[in-house]
Amino acid sequence: MRIDWTALPEAVKTEIADRVGGTHVTPATTGDHAEIAATVTGTNGRVFVKAASTDFGVRSLRFELRVSEAISGPLSPAVLWHFEAADWLVVGYEHCEGPHADLSPGSPDLDLLGQALTVLGETPTPDVPLFSPKARLGFEHPTMNGDTLVHTDLCPANLIVTPHGLQIVDWAMAAKAAPWVELAMLMPWLISAGHTPEQAEQWLARHPAWQSADPGVLGYFATKNAEKWASKSAGSTAAWMHDLAAWTSKWSTYRLRTSNTAPTN
C-alpha cells in the first residue's frame, strides 16, 4: 500500500536529497509494490525512487532490485543507486520520461511492444532467483516451464514510451518460463485496450512463440487464469480485480468456443 512521502524518516529523506540534489517530489499514480514510489527532482536531475519498510515490501523491492541490476539494458531503466537506512530499503532508478503505452488497435505503440517482446523472447534468464510459472500464477503445466526471462505484468502502466524507445518498468514479478507465457499474460491487457480476443490472438500470432504453442495448452492457460481471477474477484471489492476477471473470462470463453482441442490437463 502506498503511503505519503512525508512518512519517510528524516535520515532517509536527507540521504535521497544528498544524492539527487534536492527533493521536489511527484508521487507515482500507479503501482503498489512499494510503500513509496515517486519522481524526485534536484540539481542532479530526476530519479525515480522506490522505498519500502514492511517485510513484504522490502522482500519485493529487493527482488526487483536484483533483477533490475542483472538485466539493465535498452528495455529496462538502470539502477542508479540504492541504500538502507532507518529500516528502509531505497532504490533510485533512471527516470523514464514519456506517456504510458497505448495498446489499442492500430496504435503505433503496438509496434514498439512487438519489438520489445521479440527481444524479451530471446533473453535468457539472469543469474538471480526468479519466480516459477506456478509460483507466479498459481497453476502450472509442463510446457509453461522454460529458460526465458518473463516480465509477467506488461500492463500499460509498466510500459513507458520515451524519446529513446519503449521502457519496461517494475520487474517485481519477473519469472523464468517459456516465452509464450509472456504473450498469454499480455492477453487481458490487449482486451482491456479494446481488442477482441480474436484480434488480440491475431496480433500475438506474429510471434513464433505463440505460433508454436499447443492450442490445447493455450486453452488450458486461458481457463485456469480466468478461474483464478474469478475466485479472487469474488472475495474482493477492488475494481481492478473484477476488471481482470472480466478480461480473462472473455479470452477463456473465446478459446472454448473456437478451439477444437479440449483444454489440456
Image (spheres, helix red, strand yellow):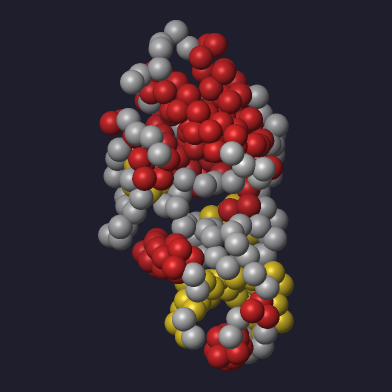
Relative height, residue 174 to residue 211 (above, below): below
**Residue 133 horizontal/vertical position (percent):** 36, 41
Q: In which quadrant is the C terminus drawn?
A: top left
Q: Quadrant of residue 220?
A: top left
How many numbered marks does the figure carry?
0
Image quadrant containing the N terminus:
bottom right
In the picture, measured across the screen, residue 7 lies left or right of residue 141, that is right
- Residue sitting nearer the eye, 109 or 8: 8
The quadrant where residue 179 appears: top left
Residue drawn at (59%, 52%) of the image:
159
- Where is residue 248 shown, x and y percent of the image? 57, 30
Specify the farthest residue to the front: 235
Query: Is 247 situated left or right of 59 in this image?
Result: right
**In-image side of 6 versus 56 (left or right):** right
> Residue drawn 50% across and 74% down?
53
Please give the name of the residue rendered at 30% of the width and 38% of the height, measured from the top-left corner: 145
Residue 101 seen in the current view: yes
Q: Residue furthest top?
A: 260
The spot of residue 23 in percent (x, y) is 67, 84
In the rendering, at what x and y percent does residue 155 appear? 59, 46
Observer able to see residue 123: no
Picture layout, residue 253 above or below residue 181: above
Q: Is residue 5 above or below residue 72?
A: below
Residue in front for this viewpoint, 161 or 222: 222
At a point 38% along the width and 66% down the height, the residue shown is: 66
